[in-house]
């Protein structure tokens, strides 16, 4: 089940991941190519295996301005829809400081540079999990 809110398709929590049944790595590679076409900057990919159950990969990129972030997000949404990934959840398009696109298996974060520097998501997600040998 899905509903439309202000032109954005939002899935119910019971829906299955959009990219289920596809090779997540191949889709990540395609997303990175599309981000490159849209002139996104400082694109990185984080493999979430063993770190989180929210998805398989996280992609983080920057746009030069809120307008550029908006354009990149819109272009990425259209490209994903054109390849059959039409059930994407999108957040943050009101201000375009930080836009999140969630395909189910892949989460894409698009930031303005100063917002990215503030949150430093890549540092948090690339850190090694603490070992179980901690003493209390």
Image (tube, rainbow, N blue to C red):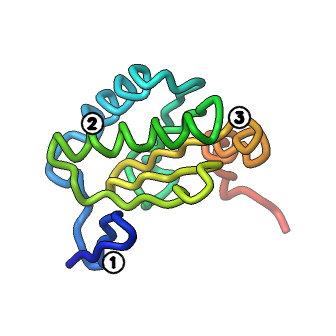
| The N terminus - image quarter | bottom left
- The residue that label 2 is drawn on is 27
- x then y, percent, for residue 127: 67, 42
Q: Residues within 10 Å of mark 3 (few under 14, many from 20)?
A: some
Residue farthest to the right, as pictured: 136
Pick whichever, 51 or 88, lies toward us: 88
Please report contact status of discs 3 and 2: CB closer than 8 Å, yes or no. no
- The residue that label 3 is drawn on is 113
The image shows residue 121, relative to residue 75, as above or below, that is below
- x then y, percent, for residue 95: 62, 55
Horizontal side of residue 69 vs 129, given as left or right:
left
Horizontal side of residue 66 vs 59, given as left or right:
right
Residue at 18%, 41% (x, y): give it.
Answer: 82
Please report contact status of discs 2 and 1: CB closer than 8 Å, yes or no. no
Point out the tag, 3 or 2, that comes first from the N-terminus: 2
| Numbered badge on residue 126 | none
| CA distance separating discs 3 and 1 | 31 Å
- x then y, percent, for residue 123: 70, 40
Q: Residues within 10 Å of mark 1 (few under 14, many from 20)?
A: few
| The C terminus - image quarter | bottom right
- x then y, percent, for residue 33: 35, 23
Pick whichever, 115 or 126, lies toward us: 115
Residue at 50%, 53% (x, y): give it.
Answer: 100
- Secondary structure, mark 3, is helix
| CA distance separating discs 3 and 2 | 25 Å
The image shows residue 10, relative to residue 134, as above or below, that is below
Query: Residue 11 lies in what quarter of the image?
Result: bottom left
Q: Residues within 10 Å of mark 2 (few under 14, many from 20)?
A: some
- The residue that label 1 is drawn on is 13
- Secondary structure, mark 1, is loop
Residue at 22%, 54% (x, y): give it.
Answer: 86
Point out the tag, 2 or 1, that comes first from the N-terminus: 1
């Amino acid at each position: 089940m899905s509903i439309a809110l202000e032109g954005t398709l939002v899935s119910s929590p019971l829906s299955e991941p959009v990219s289920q049944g596809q090779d997540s790595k191949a889709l990540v590679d395609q997303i990175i190519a599309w981000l490159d076409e849209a002139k996104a900057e400082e694109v990185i990919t984080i493999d979430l295996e063993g770190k989180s159950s929210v998805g398989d990969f996280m992609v983080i990129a920057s746009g030069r301005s809120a307008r550029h972030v908006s354009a990149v997000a819109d272009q990425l949404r259209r490209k994903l829809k054109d390849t059959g990934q039409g059930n994407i959840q999108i957040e943050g398009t009101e201000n375009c400081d930080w836009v999140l696109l969630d395909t189910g298996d892949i989460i894409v974060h698009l930031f303005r540079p100063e917002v990215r520097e503030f949150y430093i998501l890549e540092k948090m997600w690339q850190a090694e999990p603490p070992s179980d040998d901690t003493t209390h």
